[in-house]
C-alpha cells in the first residue's frame, strides 16, 4: 500500500533533511517530488530548484523521481512512501489534509496523487520549529550552474561574502557546486543558524571535462544585488584551459599514487 | 627620540591623513614609509602627493613596483582566481589613474632604507614580495635580519602588525678539512635581533578597521603598535565614486583586506 505525504514550510526550515531521515528509516520504495510553491505579496518563491532531488538521490540511490511521468512501475507502487515537498510562507489555516492550499491540490491532480498526510513546519509538533522563520519580505534569485566548475578558493571567498551580506541581506542560500577534483558539494545556509553546512556528496565526477549533473545556486533575501552576484560567480568559475590544467595534474597525481 | 614607521597605505587618503595627524600630535617628525602607497584604494595620486609633499623617506612596495613596471601584480601570491581577477582590475585601474610624475616617483623609490642599526624594507631584505609572517620559522627570521646586518628590521607587506624578538641566537659553523680528523667548529653568539612589522595604514589585516603603524624610541628601543581610527565611510564612498568594485568597500568596512592573503604566504615571487 502506498502512502503520499505532503511536507511544507518556509525556506530553510529543514524540510529536505527531515525527508532524508524519513526515507532512511523507511524500508520500502521511496518516491520524491518537489513543487515550486506560490509567491505571496512581497514574498517571492525561488525557482523550483533541482538541488533537493539531486541531494536526496545521492543519499538514497533507489529514490524515484516523480517529476518524470511513468517513473513508478506497478511493482514500485507496492509499499511505496511518496513525499511531496513544497515551500510555503504561511501557516495552513486548518489541521491535516484540510489545510492544503487549493492551488497545490490542483497541481497534484495532474500527477494523480491523493495525499493521506500533510505536515507543515511551524504548525505540526512532530516537526522541528528551530528555523521556521516568519519572513515579511523576501526576494529570490537563482542561477543554473550546470557544467560549471568552481575554483575552490574562490568559492570559499564568494560564499563567505555572500552569507555575510556583501551582496545584500541573505536569509537563505543553498547550492550544489562542482569542484575540479570531481567533488560535488552541497552548501546550505540559513540566517538563523551559525555557519554554513557543507556536505560532500557521494557522486564523484570523472577527471575529464565538465559533469552533466545538476548544479545550481538559490539565494533568498532582501536587496540582493543580482548583477554583482553574477559577476562575482563568473570570476570564480574555471575556463576550459584552467580546468584542463587542474584535471591533467590530478590525473597524473592519481597515476603516480596507483603505481606506488 | 621617537620615529614613526608607516606601511601599506594602499591609496586610502583618509587613513593616511589620520595617521599623519596622530604622528604629529605626538611631536614625531622622523617618519619612514615602507611602501605600497597604491593598490586597491581610490586615491593613489593624492596619497603619493601627500607623502612627497611631506618628504617622507619611502621604500618601494610590491604594488608600487608592479604598477610602475607595467607588470601584472605578482600572480602567484593571489590565493584564488577571484582575488587575482580583482587584483588585476585594481592594478589596471591604478595604472590608468596615476600621473606620469607619480609613476616616476614610485619608479625611483629605493628597495630599502638604512638608518644606523635599523633597516627598513617593504617585504623582506630579499624581496618586496616576501612575507615575513609573525609565526615564521625562527631560524629563517633570524637569517633575514642577520644577513641584512640590522639590529631591527622594519617591514610591512603582511598588513599584520607585530614585534618579534629573536633572543639568544647563535650561528654554529663546522668545517671538515681535507686532512682526516681535522674538524673545526665555531659558534658565534648573536645579540638580540628584532623584526617589527608596521601593519597597514590603508588596508588593515588585524581583525579590526583601524589603521596601524609603529612608534620606535631610538634611545630605549621600545616599540609601540598604534591603532588609529579614521573616516572609513569617506574611503568607502570614494571607492564607489571611483568606479572600483563595491566589494572593496564592503571588505574594508568589515575589517577584511581587499584581497585575502595567499595560503602559502611565505612564498617568494620569482617572476
Image (cartoon, grey):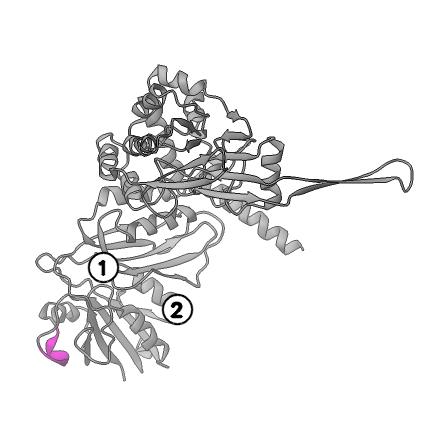
Q: Is A66 drawn above or below residue A233 in the view shown? A: below
Q: Residue furthest bottom?
A: A1
B84 lies left or right of A114: right
Disc 1 chain ID: A
Q: Quadrant of the N terminus of chain A?
A: bottom left
Q: Are marks 2 and 1 on the same chain?
A: yes
Assign a secondary structure to mark 2: helix
The residue tagged 2 is A59
Q: How busy is the neighbourhood of tag 2: few (under 14 within 10 Å), some, or many (20 plus)? A: some
Q: Quadrant of residue B138?
A: top right
Residue range in magenta is: A94-100
Q: Is residue A148 visible?
A: no
Label 2, label 1: how many angstroms apart (C-alpha)? 20 Å
A150 lies left or right of A173: right
Between A225 and B233, which is closer to the camera in this rendering?
B233
Q: Is residue A253 visible?
A: yes
The residue tagged 1 is A48
Amino acid at each position: 500500500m502506498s502512502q503520499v505525504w505532503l511536507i511544507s514550510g518556509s525556506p530553510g526550515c529543514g524540510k529536505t533533511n527531515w525527508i532524508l531521515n524519513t526515507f532512511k528509516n523507511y524500508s520500502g520504495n521511496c518516491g520524491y517530488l518537489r513543487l515550486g510553491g506560490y509567491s505571496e505579496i512581497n514574498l517571492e518563491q525561488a525557482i523550483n530548484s533541482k538541488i533537493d532531488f539531486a541531494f536526496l538521490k545521492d543519499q538514497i540511490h533507489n529514490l524515484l523521481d516523480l517529476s518524470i511521468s511513468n517513473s513508478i512501475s506497478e511493482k514500485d507502487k507496492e509499499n511505496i512512501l511518496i513525499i511531496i515537498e513544497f515551500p510555503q510562507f504561511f501557516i495552513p489555516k486548518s489541521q491535516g489534509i484540510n489545510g492544503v492550499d487549493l492551488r497545490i491540490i490542483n497541481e497534484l491532480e495532474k500527477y494523480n496523487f491523493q495525499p493521506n498526510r500533510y505536515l507543515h513546519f511551524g504548525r505540526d509538533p512532530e516537526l522541528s520549529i528551530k528555523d521556521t522563520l516568519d519572513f515579511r519580505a523576501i526576494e529570490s534569485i537563482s542561477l543554473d550552474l550546470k557544467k560549471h566548475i568552481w575554483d575552490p578558493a574562490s568559492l570559499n571567498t564568494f560564499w563567505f561574502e555572500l552569507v555575510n551580506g556583501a551582496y545584500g541581506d541573505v536569509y537563505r542560500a543553498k547550492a550544489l557546486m562542482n569542484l575540479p577534483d570531481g567533488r560535488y558539494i552541497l552548501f546550505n545556509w540559513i540566517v538563523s543558524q551559525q555557519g554554513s553546512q557543507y556536505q560532500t556528496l557521494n557522486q564523484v565526477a570523472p577527471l575529464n571535462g565538465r559533469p552533466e549533473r545538476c548544479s545550481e545556486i538559490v539565494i533568498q533575501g532582501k536587496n540582493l544585488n543580482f548583477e554583482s552576484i553574477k559577476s562575482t560567480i563568473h570570476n570564480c568559475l574555471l575556463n576550459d584551459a584552467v580546468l584542463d590544467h587542474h584535471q591533467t595534474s590530478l590525473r597524473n597525481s592519481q597515476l603516480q599514487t596507483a603505481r606506488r | 627620540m621617537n620615529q614613526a614607521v608607516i606601511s601599506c597605505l594602499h591609496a586610502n587618503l583618509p587613513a593616511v591623513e589620520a595617521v599623519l595627524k596622530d604622528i604629529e600630535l605626538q611631536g614625531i617628525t622622523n617618519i619612514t614609509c615602507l611602501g605600497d602607497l597604491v593598490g586597491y584604494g581610490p586615491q593613489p595620486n593624492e596619497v603619493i602627493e601627500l607623502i612627497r609633499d611631506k618628504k617622507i623617506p619611502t621604500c618601494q612596495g610590491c604594488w608600487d613596483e608592479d604598477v610602475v613596471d607595467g607588470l601584472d601584480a605578482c600572480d602567484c601570491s593571489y590565493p584564488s582566481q577571484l582575488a587575482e581577477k580583482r587584483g588585476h582590475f585594481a592594478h589596471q585601474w591604478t595604472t590608468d589613474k596615476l600621473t606620469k610624475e607619480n609613476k616616476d616617483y614610485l619608479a625611483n623609490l629605493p628597495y630599502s632604507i638604512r638608518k644606523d642599526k635599523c633597516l627598513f624594507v617593504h617585504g623582506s631584505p630579499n624581496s618586496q614580495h616576501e612575507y615575513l609572517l609573525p609565526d615564521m620559522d625562527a631560524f629563517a627570521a633570524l637569517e633575514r635580519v642577520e644577513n641584512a646586518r640590522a639590529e631591527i628590521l622594519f617591514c610591512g607587506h603582511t598588513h599584520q602588525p607585530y614585534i618579534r624578538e629573536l633572543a639568544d641566537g647563535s650561528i654554529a659553523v663546522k668545517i671538515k678539512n681535507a686532512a682526516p680528523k681535522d674538524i673545526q667548529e665555531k659558534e658565534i653568539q648573536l645579540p638580540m635581533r628584532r623584526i617589527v612589522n608596521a601593519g597597514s595604514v590603508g588596508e588593515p589585516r588585524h581583525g579590526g578597521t583601524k589603521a596601524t603603524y609603529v612608534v620606535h624610541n631610538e634611545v630605549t628601543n621600545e616599540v609601540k603598535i598604534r591603532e588609529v581610527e579614521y573616516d572609513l565611510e569617506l574611503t568607502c564612498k570614494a571607492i564607489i565614486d571611483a568606479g572600483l568594485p563595491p566589494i572593496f568597500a564592503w571588505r574594508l568596512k568589515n575589517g577584511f583586506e581587499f584581497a585575502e592573503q595567499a595560503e602559502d604566504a611565505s612564498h617568494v615571487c620569482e617572476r
